[in-house]
Amino acid sequence: MNEENPMKYALSFLLGAAMGAAVALLFAPSSGEELRTNLKTQADTQYARLQDEYQKGMQEMHAKMDKMSSELQAMANRAQ
């Protein structure tokens, strides 16, 4: 049985990644600075959207927790 050489796979992966990066740079439709600006703008937009979603989720969770707490308190009061 032949033993697989993990270094061969790692080297192949790294070579493929380097070639992919080189091809991407050659065919990029915009300059590096323009690309970085676009990426930063998109990242900032997505970050703001995620913050909004997080806040909405937290508000919903707190509302449900308050409702459950009230229901539990009402049940405890009825049991007494």
Image (cartoon, helix red, strand yellow):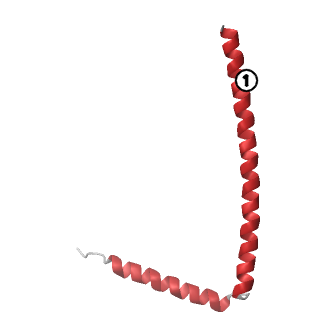
Q: Secondary structure at mark 1?
A: helix
The outermost residue toward the bottom is: 26
Q: Position of residue 50 (x, y in %)?
A: 72, 57
Extreme top residue here? 80
x, y percent for residue 80? 66, 7
Relative to the observer, which residue lies in front, 14 or 39? Answer: 39
Label 1 environment density (alpha carbons within 10 Å; few <14, some 14–19, many ≥20): few
For residue 16, above or below residue 59: below
> Image point 76% across, 59% down: which residue?
49
Q: Residue at x 71, y 68 (%)?
A: 43
Displayed quadrant of residue 33: bottom right
The quarter of the picture where residue 37 lies is: bottom right
- Tell me which residue sits at (71%, 22%) in the image: 71
Where does the image place residue 7, in percent across and percent down from the top left? Answer: 34, 79
Q: Is residue 19 left or right of residue 24?
A: left
**What is the x, y in percent for residue 31?**
72, 89
Q: Which residue is mark 1?
A: 70
